[in-house]
Image: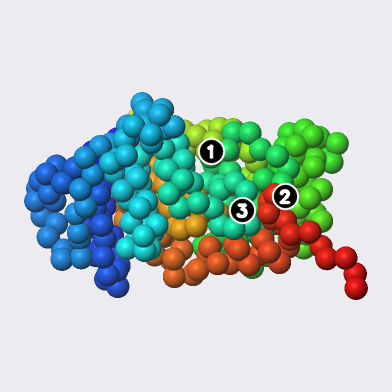
Amino acid sequence: MGGDHGPEELLQGVKLGLAAEPALRQVFVVGPEPEVRAALARIGLADPRVEVRNASEVITMEDDPAVALRRKKDSSVLRTLELVRDGAADAAISSGNTGGLYAGASIRLGRLDPVKRATIACILPSFHGAWVLVDGGANPECEPEHLLQFAVMGSVYARAMIGIDKPRIGVLSNGSEDSKGTELTRQAVSLIRSTDLNCRGYCEGYDLFMDGIDVCVCDGFVGNIVLKTAESLGKSVRGMLKEELLSSPIRKAGALLAKGGLKRIAERMNPETYGGAPLLGLNGCVVKVHGGARRTSVMHAIRQTRRFVELGINRTIETELVRLAVVAPEKQVPARPPA
């Protein structure tokens, strides 16, 4: 119910997702039932795998998440998360208020046992492939231990979803030299280097889109700026290309000849190609879709979410955090004295 283009556009994405994933057993659609059923009828979605679950309230983009979660107990976001909590659903997808989704998921699902902070993981394109950004905006203020856990979770996600065997991890900074950065980033690099993760130290903004790194680690304040800057740059470049290529008959002819290549570039730069951004570290699979997502983005998010569940990414995250002894300080078990 929280998307910029209304429930009908999101349901069109569900329709595409069901067609693309015939093995899906069930999709719950959560929202005010009369409105949802009317939208389903308008788009002609009568798949028996779709089940409507009523939720009488909606957390809007203007709502303060903490206040809304207390006052809107019957919101579509909370009802969706409860389906995952109760085992009726394997995953939740939402294009609504990010803060509401993050806070609601933390309350309704809780975190995986070793995790201190969940993180938003975003896949973005690079010159020859893709890379993972953690944190994409969930935690504006972090401690070094949080960034260490983000590095572990981001590495697991990159291996599973992008297919990189030993992802190169970098902490985002204003230079590659060890003397750069802040106290937070310096301590984070030291902690990550103390593990067997493939830590490259600092990475710079230049590295992100030029195949210099596979997992970029930062706090959510910096990460959200990177994410939105990248999105706006992609739209700007596409707009400039279109404007210039249509500015004269000769350029139009050239654009026609290069149509295939230009289309491929547009697909690689389009964030909707990558679906949504999972909240890693939760006791359940929760995927955030962009508020302005169109139907193709929802379809890709459904496909991405199915892979997340089937690959057992949460179990792998738990295993890796325990293996590397990267656990929240308050959950660490004191070592036994020698016999």
Q: Position of residue 309 (x, y in %)?
A: 44, 66
Above/below status of 104 relative to 156: above
Q: What residue did someone put label 1 on? A: 137
Label 2 amino acid?
Pro
Residue 91 in sight from this viewpoint: yes
Q: Residues within 10 Å of mark 1 (few under 14, many from 20)?
A: many
- The answer to which quarter of the image holds residue 249 is top left
Label 1 amino acid?
Gly
Q: Position of residue 88 (x, y in %)?
A: 32, 63
Reading the chain from its start, which is encountered first: label 3 or label 2? Answer: 3
Label 3 amino acid?
Val
Decide if residue 107 is on the left or right side of residue 249.
right
Looking at this view, name the residue that lies furthest to the right: 339
**Residue drawn 56% across and 48% down?**
118
- Measure the alpha-carbon separation of dots 1 and 2: 23 Å
Closest to the observer, 280 or 107: 107
Q: What residue did someone put label 3 on? A: 115
Q: Residues within 10 Å of mark 2 (few under 14, many from 20)?
A: few
Q: Are marks 1 and 2 in contact (CB under 8 Å)?
A: no
Q: Position of residue 206 (x, y in %)?
A: 66, 40
Q: What residue did someone put label 2 on? A: 329
- Measure the alpha-carbon separation of dots 1 and 3: 17 Å
Decide if residue 291 is on the left or right side of residue 324.
left
**Residue drawn 81% across and 62% down?**
335
**Residue drawn 33% across and 56% down?**
83
Nearer the camera: disc 1 or disc 2: 2
Reading the chain from its start, which is encountered first: label 1 or label 2? Answer: 1
Above/below status of 83 relative to 218: below
Q: Are marks 3 and 2 in contact (CB under 8 Å)?
A: no
Decide if residue 211 is on the left or right side of residue 15.
right
- The answer to which quarter of the image holds residue 22 is bottom left
